[in-house]
Image (spheres, rainbow, N blue to C red):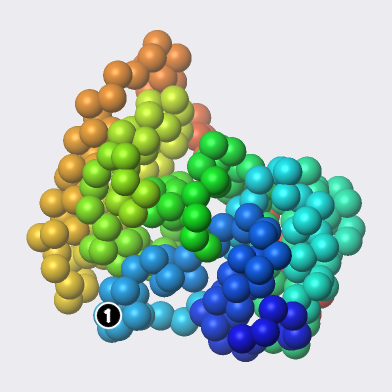
Amino acid sequence: MTQNGKPLEDTIAEAERVAEAARAQKVGVKLLGGAGVHLHSPSSHHPPLRRKYGDLDYVISSKDRKVALAFFPAIGYEANDRFNLMQGDRRLYFFDGNNGKQVDVFIDTIRMSHVIDLRSRLGHNGPCASPSDLLLSKLQIFEVNRKDMVDLVALVLDHPVASNDDEAIDASYVARLAAEDWGLYRTLQLNLAKLRHTLDELDVDREKVSSRLDELWTAVEAQPKPLKWRMRAQVGDRMRWYELPEEVRSPYQAE
């Protein structure tokens, strides 16, 4: 693969091309989304967990913002200059006009249905966010879809629940975040129920996945909750606890 040139049509091959260029140029981009799960989880390479992938999502540290603004155009992407000027302190967009795809780059935090602060979690080696952060990036989506669920099954199937292990799902980390924000806790609770429902429909090692989900949620429930959390929990679902992020339309998408 070459570092420069044009984006490839196949999303996974393109993710690997970007990762190679980033390594060569020492750009700290970490892959998120389904493509990130694919690179982390061999189970996603085969049915029933194999699927097609579209756009690429990344997260970077704010210190790499200027580097990223130069990096993606250098490897064949077109910047969304208007969006990047207005929102570029927290998010960047680039387009692949040949294949009609886009790259979404979060800066320091993932801001979707909830805010996941990753500033202290981007220093590790490797092209992807950690399994724990890949998990949270999917589970925190209020309007989660079946493709997200399939990705989550692959991720949990291939990664044990353990602490202080970059290749495991860190339940204590997830529990700490859920204890800081009742809204995130509630969305995780709802989505784990949906995940179990999806699991029942898939021909995989359901017992292993279910056991790991039990282990994760036991840690979340056991984590002490501060007064602010408990007060918000009393309000419950009567007040909306999530955001519905707007999509940024690519100039190559039809109206």
Vertical relation: 18 (above or below) 221: below
**Residue at 23% across / 63% down in the picture?**
157
Quadrant showing the N terminus: bottom right
**Residue at 34% across / 80% down in the picture?**
45
Q: Secondary structure at mark 1?
A: loop
Whole-percent x and y of residue 214? 17, 45
**What residue is pinned by disc 1?**
48
**Which residue lies most toward the left here?**
207
Q: Residues within 10 Å of mark 1 (few under 14, many from 20)?
A: some
Q: Amino acid at mark 1?
A: Pro
Q: Is residue 231 visible?
A: no
State the image quarter where residue 221 is shown.
top left
**Residue at 80% across / 73% down in the picture?**
74
Left or right: 55 as drawn, with respect to 135: right
Whole-percent x and y of residue 96? 74, 78
Whole-percent x and y of residue 121? 51, 42
State the image quarter where residue 104 is shown.
bottom right
Vertical relation: 73 (above or below) 160: below
Q: Is residue 210 visible?
A: yes
Quick one: 190 or 185, which is closer to the camera?
185
